[in-house]
Amino acid sequence: MSAQLDAASAAHDRATAASDAPIAASVVTKASTAPPIKARHVKPTPRPLTWRCERCDKLIRGTGIGFGYVDLREASAAQQGRLRGPDGQALKAPWHIAHAKCAPDITKPLSAHTVAWCDKMTTIEALLTHMADLSRVPWFGGTDWGALVRTVLAETEFHEVETSERRAERSAARARRKAEGLPEGDPRHGTETGYLNWSCRCTECQIFWATQGRACRARVKTALTEANRIRADVDAGGLVELDTVMPMN
């Protein structure tokens, strides 16, 4: 009897293995034919370029604030080989950078200059695209565009280093102020400057900050109460005077 049970069990195992084989093969086939998982590519943020006015030595920020410009007369002369230095060496027409308010004569009608606005060239890609557009005009080969690019890239690098150094200096200064604290009798005790900028937690500064917090919460509560009252009047079909919602001076 035991031999018969063992034979029946072995036959059942063989039948189960045979029935599971097609399923396992299909799973392997699907897994092998599935497309590989691609790593997500995050496009890096382009580094913004820094432009500095040659006339006032300040940064150019905003739309329509500044531009690079070149004298077309010098560019044409350089293209024809007539622009020479003191030693007779051939020169190229230089590009300059300025605020619109620092060089108002450049954008006047019938001006002998052409401009390239800085807000249109905020990244290296945009700078190269503008260079490709300018390269179609015949006088562009007589200008020293490379010097302009080198100047902008050097200014951008300097500004990034300067910004990081200033940020580190401000952090160190805040740490020193927090460690030293305000001296006794300083008029900044009990003020927002003392509590926030100097991280002073003396009794006078804490009382000031608590008073400011209570006043702020009271103003918010009053505004919410008034808004709920107006909403209730509107829901009830009542008329709300304009001066109640928007006080007239």
Image (cartoon, grey):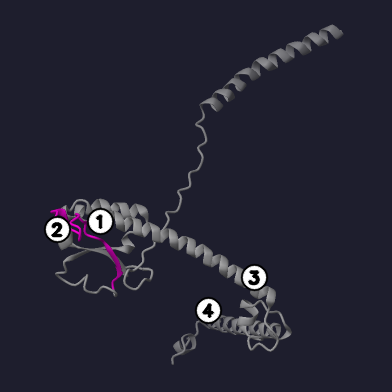
Residue 122 visible: no
- Left or right of 201? Residue 174 is left
Magenta residues, start to end:
78-100
Label 3 element class:
helix
Circle 1: element type: loop
**Could you tell me how far apart the alpha carbons at marks 2 and 3 are, in whole angstroms?**
59 Å
Q: Earlier in the sequence, mark 2 or mark 1?
A: 2
Q: Name the front one of labels 2 and 3.
A: 2
> Which of the pair 112/63 is nearer the observer?
112
Q: Mark 1, residues whose alpha carbon is within 10 Å: few (<14), some, or many (≥20)?
A: some
* Residue on which the image places disc 1: 144
Image coords of residue 107 (percent x, y):
21, 70
Q: Is residue 202 above or below residue 25?
A: below
Residue beneath the point at 50% across and 85% down = 238
Residue 77, numbered circle:
2
In percent of width and height, residue 196 lies at 62, 77
Q: Earlier in the sequence, mark 2 or mark 3?
A: 2
**Residue 27 on the magenta segment:** no
Residue identifier under label 4: 235
Q: Nearer the viewer, mark 1 or mark 3?
A: 1
Point out residue 146 in the picture as x, y percentages from the top left corner. 29, 54
Location of residue 63 by image quarter: bottom left
> Which residue in the protein does label 3 denote?
175
Separation of disc 1 and disc 3 at Cα? 47 Å
Marks 2 and 3 in Cβ contact (< 8 Å) = no
Residue type at tag 1: Asp
